[in-house]
Image (cartoon, rainbow, N blue to C red):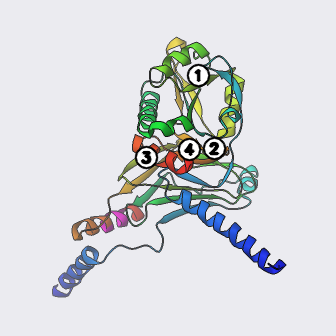
Amino acid sequence: MAIVTVGASAAVAWAAFTPVTFASREETFEIPKGTWARRMAGNKVEILPSQVFLTLGIRDVLLLKNMDEVPQIFGPTLMMPGQSFRLPFEVASSYQFACTAHASGQMTVVVDEQPDTPWRRLLWRTRRVFRVVA
Amino acid sequence: MNCATRRAALMACVLLSVIARAAETEGLKAGVFNPAREAPDFSVRGSDGTALTLSRYRGKVVVLGFGYTSCPNVCPVTLAVLAQALRKLGPSAAQVQVIYLTVDPERDNAERLKQYLAAFDPTFVGGTGTAAQMAAVRTSYGVTAEKHGTGSDYAVAHSSFVYLITPEGKLRALMPFGHKADDYVHDISMLLN
């Protein structure tokens, strides 16, 4: 019992005090070459999730790339072949974009506050676990 | 200067201009396209009574939005923000043109657009045309518009973002709905410089 308590405390302490870092501030989604052809062949291709989660200060840029050979509506906009679209966020909020790529016709970008205090880091990591599980 | 030195100097210049262009757009508040493509030109009926084309405003930053005069929420907010941004820009506003193309050509004729836009800023120019003309423009910009409801009191759900087009006619950036006037001032100033 004591071991479990010590282990749980260590996990909570780690989650609260270890800074949250990412290698890049960009969350990248890419339409690979041949996507249009696969769609035309009747394959269901989902690239962009209907909900994207970002965090201010550490991962707050949405980067969309169209590497296919035809123009694509990707996220909120029309993108030409080989073109990328880089959208930075500066305010924590939930952003709705019309997106024809999704059945709902909508894409949501949820931007969380920067986890810059132990309590926020703990909340951020807990939320992340639940989102992955969900 | 020998040939090799001249070639190296030329390559350095090209590299520097690429780096400068990347740095210039790196700090934009709007979403940035890379590479920027040529903004599709169009020819529709302008609210000023003349043919409205995008190429007419080459040399200015064009702020291009899509909406309609009966829009209950998004369009009035966007246009008010743009009017505020132009006021904040001061004399530089003369180098900016706001164009608002209707997604509801059935109800928005040139006169109605003119009256509506003048309430925000008399320099704003609206554009209308046949349903097919306006649909073609929307397609070229990836803008969606969908009619909801029947009778004369219908609504049109439409893309709410605004495009920023450089003085060279490149479709450089897309500002999502909800940004403040200061963000437009920031980005337009960067594109002008």
**Residue named by callout 1:** B104
Q: Amino acid at mark 4?
A: Cys
Give the chain letter at badge 3: B
Q: Which mark is residue A99?
A: 4
Callout 4 and callout 1 share a chain:
no
What element does badge 1 sit on? loop
Q: Residues within 10 Å of mark 3 (few under 14, many from 20)?
A: some
Image location of residue B104, percent across then percent down: 58, 22
* Chain designation of label 1: B
The image shows residue A114 at horizontal and vertical percentages of 32, 63
**How far is mark 2 from mark 1, CA to CA?**
28 Å
Q: Secondary structure at mark 3?
A: helix
Query: Residue at image x 43%, y 46%?
Result: B183
Report the side of B39 relative to A77 (left or right). Answer: right
Disc 1 packing (10 Å; few <14; some 14–19; many ≥20) = many
**Amino acid type assigned to the residue bearing label 1 in the image:** Asp
Answer yes or no: do the residues labelled 4 and 1 have beta carbons within 8 Å?
no
**Front residue of this view, candidates A47 and B118:** B118
Q: Position of residue B192 (x, y in %)?
A: 56, 47
- Amino acid of disc 2: Pro
* Between discs 1 and 3, the one toward the N terminus: 1
Residue located at (26% from left, 65% from top): A120
